[in-house]
Image (cartoon, coloured by chain):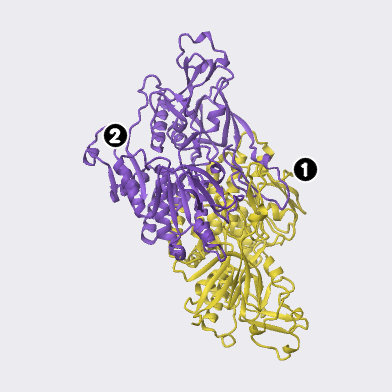
Chain colours: A purple, B yellow
Amino acid sequence: MARPRERILILGGGWAGFVLSRNLSPAKYDITVVSPRQNFVFTPLLSEATVGTLEFSHVVEPVRDRKQRINFAPAVARSVDFAKKRVSCEASIVQGTATDIVVRSEPEKVESTREMRGKELDIQRWRQGTKFQLDYDKLVIATGCITNTFNTPGVQENALQYRDIEDARRVQRRIRECFELAVLPNKPEELRTHLLHFAVVGGGPTGIEFVGLLADYIRGDLLKYYPQVKDRVRITLYDVAPKILGMFDESLSTYAMETMKLQGVEIKTSHHIEELRWGEPNKPPIQMDPKSCLTLKTKEDGETGVGMCVWVTGNAINPFIKEALADIDEFPEASIAKRPSDLAKDTKPAGWKVKKNPKTGALLVDGYFRVQLEAKDETTAAMNDVFAIGDNAMLEHGSPPATAIAANQEAKYLAQRLNKNDFDHAAKFSFQDMGLLAYIGDDKGLMQMPHTEVTEKSKMFPEGLKGRTAWLVWRGAYLSLVLSWRNCFLILIYWVLSRLFGRRIQ
Amino acid sequence: MARPRERILILGGGWAGFVLSRNLSPAKYDITVVSPRQNFVFTPLLSEATVGTLEFSHVVEPVRDRKQRINFAPAVARSVDFAKKRVSCEASIVQGTATDIVVRSEPEKVESTREMRGKELDIQRWRQGTKFQLDYDKLVIATGCITNTFNTPGVQENALQYRDIEDARRVQRRIRECFELAVLPNKPEELRTHLLHFAVVGGGPTGIEFVGLLADYIRGDLLKYYPQVKDRVRITLYDVAPKILGMFDESLSTYAMETMKLQGVEIKTSHHIEELRWGEPNKPPIQMDPKSCLTLKTKEDGETGVGMCVWVTGNAINPFIKEALADIDEFPEASIAKRPSDLAKDTKPAGWKVKKNPKTGALLVDGYFRVQLEAKDETTAAMNDVFAIGDNAMLEHGSPPATAIAANQEAKYLAQRLNKNDFDHAAKFSFQDMGLLAYIGDDKGLMQMPHTEVTEKSKMFPEGLKGRTAWLVWRGAYLSLVLSWRNCFLILIYWVLSRLFGRRIQ
């Protein structure tokens, strides 16, 4: 009996991987998503959950679906054999358990374990997940990127990242913790001030939205519970560039800076972070101790005490793409889509590697998102069964920005091609610029019209929208993208409640 | 200028402490709650949150209040000096931070830390909170109890407790984790079966409610996502007593057992747990490893593999009451309410200690919840400024059961006395039996009428209510006790949603 459906393996459950999995035809494909996280995170609303307007459960959708059309393996991919069509995986299931252990198989993340009353525990053994292999007929690489710390000393260890639910929960807890620490009896006055200084590094849309909501949350809600520290709270946004929201037009960026300053956010553009360490400024560094504060050192200002530093400065290529997808052991003869005429001469493995952008390290794909191999003599051969979408891929004919909207469009396009199997016939992918949106706090948003074409709307608002209208568009736009209607409904209710009666402190 | 209000210090933010804090007159008292948890947990709905019917945030209320009438110190009490009227505290704020550290200052809980890439970290230093002292005019001890493991080997380390939100979150994660582990490729068949065996130890109302909801959740929701393991799932309830729900009448208890058996819950009464360890049954024990299963050993059945063991077997006195409140250094001359006529003879400290129930170790209080001191010759002296309510206190004239309802009544009574300051004039506390309620799964509840008086209702239903009516009463009764209207509203919405469309898997 012939196997009726092709096995498609999707590495990654973020925007690209998740949207693809939900748009592929389950009648045609046996779909498996491999991801260390069992939930897709609706990143545009992550900050709303962090500040308690929403629940974290409102901004996630399970990768597994109730109708069993999508299989899920809670694992990370370790290597791919293109010739054998097989992926080696390591289960990464242990995210928090019986024993308080947080073991995540992503090599860039740091693990946590439980101190067992003096017993030495074999952490290395926990960290290691069960290994297994998955065979595929088609493979889609959508593992995304990791946070780029630019190798700034101390940032990887001491800054809070802001990519998924666990990160956001940590930020949420630390905000409250800083307030509680600052009002404890017997705390030195200076330390109180440091603890209530919140630093965010990165002036892109994610950083701006988080800072905007943080300011709303602290001034609108938290300070009702802690009025005694009103004058100590500081929020500072750092960016190395001379302006924030670099992808927006000058006037919108300026408006954002002005609005945020009025809200009490200090904006330090053209600032270079040199170090982040535990301990108070101008005192000897200490080992990590959450009861204390951190010191952020910039080239321009020297040392400043902060209670928390959230790091949201863009993408670096993840180690799987970097290390596992490099040289190949065996040339995947059967997978080559279009055979260059002179290819036969040299298909020895040593001669071929996965084609990447030399600067970013992203996979350089063709117009149909096919991953390409490259010989020493720069001959290129695309594979017809291996694809890459999202932030870890780059289109050779020009890539869209690394946004959720772009990943979403790419995933939908690829799903269509795969469902129809019309590669080489269909038009190559082209990104449809939908404009840009950002929330900047104080109920205000920014909306920039698409640059590519002059639409009716952009003629009406040549500089984009700003202020309250943009804020409403912002909310509506996000809501319509949320995937389950249950979450839509709950998000609406929570928005109304927090609007009428304030947020609950978290 | 005279200090206008008396400082009242409440140790503990559970049912007793929280309800007291909200019922004291802020005009009369400067109220401070000392508790390691910043939220009060509405324990009767904890299981509903664990299985995803509700959010965890619906079943908590912040101890701090928005109007700043109640101060809060996130700390545990370490010792009390009755003569100086001063409590030594240790801040326990670091519950999860920047650095993934979970340091809780309760000595009975185990701490967790982050493994820092080989760096040895000074865990002891994190664990130690900032120390400070608080002076009081009146002190209320409401620190509650800890889980009684009866010194069963391995239980303290390896069983999941079920007292607060963090415990419940761990249970929630482990349930899902067991399913994910069980469907991973390459798992041995036996291990899959062990992982999907869920054990609950303790047949009281908490254990029964959790088991009932767990069965609903697994069969009604989780198995939709994991139909392939349908026949492997087992839920077993263990109790050392010959019947479950010992405090209920025989007929209700029997009904509960029958209903739960129909739901597929195995009930093992008269079973003695001898050990809980990591590893598979009849194989050598292993160190804790969440990828594997546990082995539960009973006297009657020998070894059985389980994916998780939740331990809900009643109360043990907490170490603060046990160790810190024992002998006293200085006799609190000024605090003695009624001086026994022959007291003057011997007020040397060595002669006095805090009066406790010799069996349970609970503080033996008088009819107004005043903590008493006891001399060697059994002379008793009550203090007029130190009180104890809730599970850590026992009334000399007979104590109510250790339930939330009793703690609630005690707190309200004491708040009234303190507000009116009518000790010795008012009637002593007497518990009003409101009957008993329990949920047993499959939309069915039990309700037992009060035994103390023959009410109209109990005449109508001499054996109490059971089945669907009791379930409705159960839901209504809980809801009306929830403290904020916002939570009431959200709980209703969530109940309707999960009734109509099923729970979300967590």
Tell which subunit mark 1 falls on: B
**Which residue position is annotated with label 2?**
A451
Residue type of the residue flagged with mark 2: His
Tell which subunit mark 2 falls on: A
Residue type of the residue flagged with mark 1: Pro
Mark 1 is surrounded, within 10 Å at the Cα level, by few (under 14), some (14 to 19) or many (20 or more) other residues, namely few
Of residues A343 and A84, which is closer to you in this image? A343
Of residues B57 and B476, which is closer to you in this image? B57
Disc 2, SS: loop
Q: CA distance from mark 2 to mark 1?
A: 67 Å
Q: Residue A324 at what x, y percent from top left?
A: 57, 27
Q: Residue B142 at what x, y percent from top left?
A: 61, 70
Q: Residue B393 at what x, y percent from top left?
A: 65, 73
A24 vs A169: above or below: above
Do we see residue B256 in this rendering? no
Do we see residue B83 in this rendering? yes
Query: For this view, does B212 lie left or right of residue A306?
Result: right
Query: For this view, does B114 lie left or right of residue B502?
Result: right
- Say how many tags the image has: 2
Q: Are marks 2 and 1 on the same chain?
A: no
For residue B284, which numbered disc appears in the image?
1
Q: Residue B167 at what x, y percent from top left?
A: 60, 55
Q: Write down the quadrant of residue B412 in the picture.
A: bottom right
Disc 1, SS: loop
Q: Nearer the viewer, mark 2 or mark 1?
A: 2
Mark 2 is surrounded, within 10 Å at the Cα level, by few (under 14), some (14 to 19) or many (20 or more) other residues, namely few
Going by the picture, which residue comes out furthest to the bottom?
Answer: B341
For residue A218, which numbered disc appears in the image?
none
